[in-house]
Image: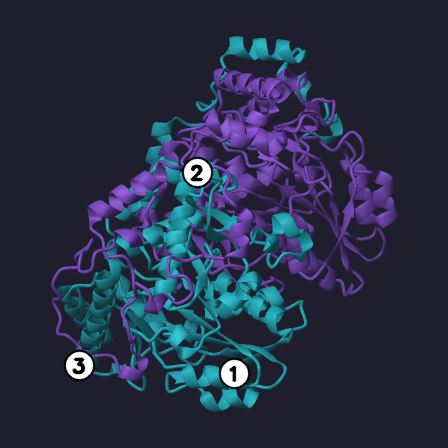
Chain colours: A purple, B cyan
Amino acid sequence: MELIFERSIAGRRGFDFGPSDVPTHANIPPNYARQEDAPLPEVSELDVVRHYTRLSQKNFSIDTHFYPLGSCTMKYNPKFTEALARLAGFTDLHPLLAQLSGGEQWAQGALQILYELEQWMCEMTGFSDFTMQPLAGAHGELTGIMLMAAYHKSKGNSKKKYVIIPDSAHGTNPASAAVAGYETISIPSNKDGGMDLEALKAAVNEETAGLMMTVPSTYGVFEGNISEIAKIIHAVDGIMYYDGANLNAVLGRCRPGDVGFDVMHINTHKTFTTPHGGGGPGAGPVGVNQKLAKFLPVSRVVKRSDGMYVLDYDHKESIGYIASFYGNFGLLVRAYAYMLMLGKEGLIDTTSHAVLNANYIMKKLEPYYKICFDRICMHESVFSASKQAERGVHAIDIAKFLIDQQIHPPTVYFPISVPEAIMIEPTETESKQTMDHFIAKMIEADDLSKTSPAVFEGFPKTMPVSRPDEVKAARDVKTSFFGAAPTHAA
Amino acid sequence: MNPYITNTPQEVEQMLGDIGVKNIDALFADIKPEHRPRSFDLPKGLSEYEVMRRVTALSLKNNVHAVPFIGGGYYDHYIPTAVPSLTSRGEFYTAYTPYQPECAQGTLQALFEFQSSMCALTGMEVSNASLYDGGTALYEAMMMAIRITGRHKVVMDGGVSPIYRKILKTYTHHLSYQFKETPVVHGQSSREEIVRLLDKDTAVIILQNPNFFGAIDDLTDIIAKAHSVGALAIVSVYPISLGLLKTPADMGADIVTGEGQSLGLPLNFGGPYLGFMCTGKKYIRKMPGRIVGETVDSKGRRCFVNTLQAREQHIRREKATSNICTNVSLCAIQAAIFMAMIGKNGLKEMARLNLDKAEYTKQVLSKIKGVVVKRSAPTFNEFTVHLPKDASEVVAAMISKGFAAGFPLGRYYPGMERYLLVAVTEKRTKEEIDRYAKALQEVLG
């Protein structure tokens, strides 16, 4: 499809600001002024509407397709949360208004939402304090690791060098630890998908700053030895970090704060179904226990004895500002509304049915695909397409086959420790009929891998695009319509 | 109650039978009794109607009716209706990160168009597909400059947003970087101080245009000085101002970042916003965040993919250029649509309206006794005024008259308690500006 720039006709316009009601000021002094107009497209409003409507139709999305993307939790995003987040009382609120002297009184509704979310998240996870500021899960991780660093620094412990991370972890874990100045040590998993305790003991020493763990892990396995692991880490005054990517699997069943963790982040798009937006914006609230609370970023939202919600910056040991304001407020409103509707029982049901659905798919596919861990799974299961690969059909080929069946592929090649990984997470919002259809298509793919493996090369056949040349994209880098010199193109 | 769960009791029974367990609790057998929650005391669920009523009531407790003359890097610009109407399409906002390009061409092409428009705006060669917000984008740019130069000293202009400067300090206070801040003199960067601090250890100089006080500048000379010692220059910009102002590319900037909220995103009490980053082609492999590239498919058709992923955390893990994973794709798409809607001429007109209305406001405010409009440097749509009393008190009094009068600079600059930062966008009418001046006159008595 053509680019919006390729529809551009000189002089055409999409929007009229109307006549000015003030006198025209003299021009900007020439040395401060732009030489040539920015070559933005020149198109009509109808051009814009058709172009982006048609573009949107080239996407798969939850509203249109089943998305069993393991580890990503693509559940339905209720429409009412969307409507609430778009209320003018939220969208038109300037963040600095609350920082004026006494200005919090003008943002009481917004501050109450942030305050109550913090209370609920604490209760849900067993932590004492939460900050809503981190702008995405990975941002929450970085914040959490900085809290870890602040803790060691406050104890005058300069020996702490390493963060321990299991091999099944998301790539953000080691990246966040590295950005915060730590080196990382990877720990292998045992044959049941749990952490290899002997390997852990061998790796832990006085230089261990902490451990980052996803529970359940990205293998969909609940770590039974958490208490032992926490003991090992705490024995060297290390910090236990809970990656909340899979919190949706344990709501009401286990709280990280109760089982030895000191700090965690929540991905609101996973557990509280805020929309993914094609890759953000997200929100990554961070929770801590008493050990780390004093280091949390400012500002904190507190409730005064007179019932007023106010911003509190007075925390001497705080790590400081980690984002410009109070978090991705628009997403937090959606999470708040979702939690308010579901309440305690609804949240517990979410977890129950997410796990039920995942186990159902695992059971049905087990005869056809190699299961990585022969045990009950939590909210997702990991297969390997190793049997199919022997026939020349790889995980990516199965993924492309599914696209032709109008199903978004599961996560493939992750966790990286599993060859030919296929990771399936149906979520609680999908029906048995949708799952049965998916299961049938997965079985069909296995059949095809036996009867006619060569056909996979041509998949997907039905899409406007098939198997982009990613090597060319990285070699002949073109990341803009203008190529290298924007102001001289158009 | 959870209306989004579709399994009927009969289906649940059937599925449990297929799995071979008696009940759902059996699926949680891996969680030992000692690992079960000590408490899970949350409120009871509510109906959709009740939630709508409650949350709507909360929204009405926020004051969004005071006419805004407050900016500080975040502005009340008009958003054409078509813009949010398009990004409200479920195909955009309920899609995932485009890991499977065949079923994500909509998101990928829209992000490619966003990158192209950001290049058009800044004059730079390449753009990434967004970062979290203006402040964290500046942090990422600083880290990128440190990686490129292998040096550890950062020179930061005092005109850079104090919010951004606080963020940069948070992320680096435990790392061994040397920070030097230079003062603002007569509203603009102090050439003298900057030149004094630049040396062979300097990785980067960080500048902002317009600066936090609203002053505009031509930073070409400073950037040339930085280059002469082998340092890079980052300029944080306000996108709408680029309708009229010299581009950072023409000034010689190496990395350009900024807050993209002004490009069609609501104020939203601080987020989600849109961090952006542009640079030269030679640095693209050092740039953090997702980048969309053009390529062809197996049949030679043009298409778009996430490219240069070898920089990113999901491939490189601890060796990645950044830990960023999710960015703000939907905000970037919204900005792309906004830029297409207002277009080449619209951007220029919008910037012109901002300039003219701010200048008109300066005129009417300077007629008020005791109010001094600072005129040492030219400005775009925001400027500082000196008041005869504490700006915080004035702002509090102005709110009760229906105006968010501006941002008192004393909040971030001790000693500037009587200074007020005033922003005026294209949305402010002459009538509002006149009423604002009248109210200010009354407040100052």
Local packing at callout 1 (Cα closer than 10 Å; few below 14, some 14-19, many 20+) is many
Of residues A455 and A154, the one nearer the viewer is A455
- Contact flag, marks 3 and 1 (Cβ < 8 Å): no
Q: Secondary structure at mark 3?
A: loop
Q: Disc 3: which chain?
A: B
Local packing at callout 2 (Cα closer than 10 Å; few below 14, some 14-19, many 20+) is many
- Can you identify the residue that label 3 sits on? B367
Q: CA distance from mark 1 to mark 2?
A: 46 Å
Residue A35 image position (x, y, % from top left)? 29, 76
For the point 54% across and 36% down, the residue is: A271
* In this picture, residue A377 sits left or right of residue A17: right
- Can you identify the residue that label 1 sits on? B226
* Both labels 3 and 1 in a single chain: yes
Q: Is residue A301 above or below residue B4?
A: below
Q: CA distance from mark 3 to mark 2?
A: 63 Å
Local packing at callout 3 (Cα closer than 10 Å; few below 14, some 14-19, many 20+) is few
Answer yes or no: is residue B374 visible.
no
- Contact flag, marks 3 and 2 (Cβ < 8 Å): no
Disc 3 vs disc 1: which is toward the camera? 1
Q: Disc 2: which chain?
A: A
- The amino acid type, in three-letter code, at marker 3 is Lys
- Can you identify the residue that label 2 sits on? A465
Of residues B149 and A6, the one nearer the viewer is A6
